[in-house]
Amino acid sequence: MSYDIKVNGAVQSVDVDGDTPLLWVLRDVLGMTGTKFGCGMALCGACTVHIDGVVSRSCITPIDSVGTSNVTTIEAIGATAAGAKIQKAWLDREVVQCGYCQSGQIMSAAALLASNPHPSDSDIDGAMSGNICRCGTYVRIREAIKQAAQ
């Protein structure tokens, strides 16, 4: 079936089954590989995107549920004010170790700052709790979010 979805501000036409996860549409059909596959069950956060500005796990989001919503991926988050601040802070604080989870981490952090420009530690913990980092860079992640919020 054919679907028109808005990804990073551009309408894309895709021909996939309606239950195809958004993650696979982004990666396999549209060639946007910044969004990662982690667990496939929305537990790790590696596949995080924004749908109309809201954090969403693309691995469990069927394409037929997207409708006319705007999907923002890691490829375009730097064009937003919060995303640009987060990306700069990520570099300044040298957050990345292996890097696999970082697109999801950045997407969650950018959504946090977009909705709450001055988050407390508990706000950060709550917003980031769905993102797992096997390398354990959580301290640097929190420092980067605090820097971006200044």
Image (spheres, grey):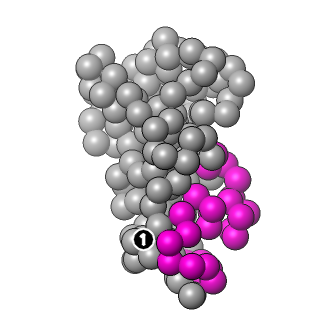
Taking the magenta stretch, the answer to whether it contains residue 39 is no
Kindly identify which residue carries mark 1. Answer: 66
Does dot 1 land on a helix, a strand or a loop? loop
Quadrant where the C terminus sits is top left
Residue at 38% x, 43% y: name it. 111
User: Which residue appears at 41% of the width and 52% of the height?
Assistant: 56
**Can residue 86 be seen by looking at this rendering?**
no
User: Left or right: where does residue 33 sit relative to residue 130?
Assistant: right
123 left or right of 45 in image: left
Q: Is residue 88 visible?
A: yes
Number of labelled discs?
1
Is 113 drawn above or below residue 136 in the view shown? Answer: below
Return the x and y of residue 45 as percentages of the image width and height: 49, 39
Q: Amino acid at mark 1?
A: Val
Q: Quadrant of the N terminus?
A: bottom right
Give me the residue at 47% from left, 67% from top: 62
Q: Is residue 131 above or below residue 42?
A: above
Determine which quarter of the picture holds residue 20. Answer: bottom right
Q: Image height check: is 56 above or below 38? A: below
User: Mark 1, residues whose alpha carbon is within 10 Å: few (<14), some, or many (≥20)?
Assistant: some
Where residue 26 appears, as percent x and y from the top left, is 62, 63
Q: Nearer the viewer, residue 148 or 47?
A: 47
Between 79 and 33, which is closer to the camera in this rendering?
Answer: 33
Q: Looking at the rendering, which quadrant does residue 116 occupy? A: top left
> Measuring 63% from the left and 17% from the top, which residue is drawn there?
135
Q: Residue furthest bottom?
A: 1
Region of the chain picked out in magenta, as a range: 11-36
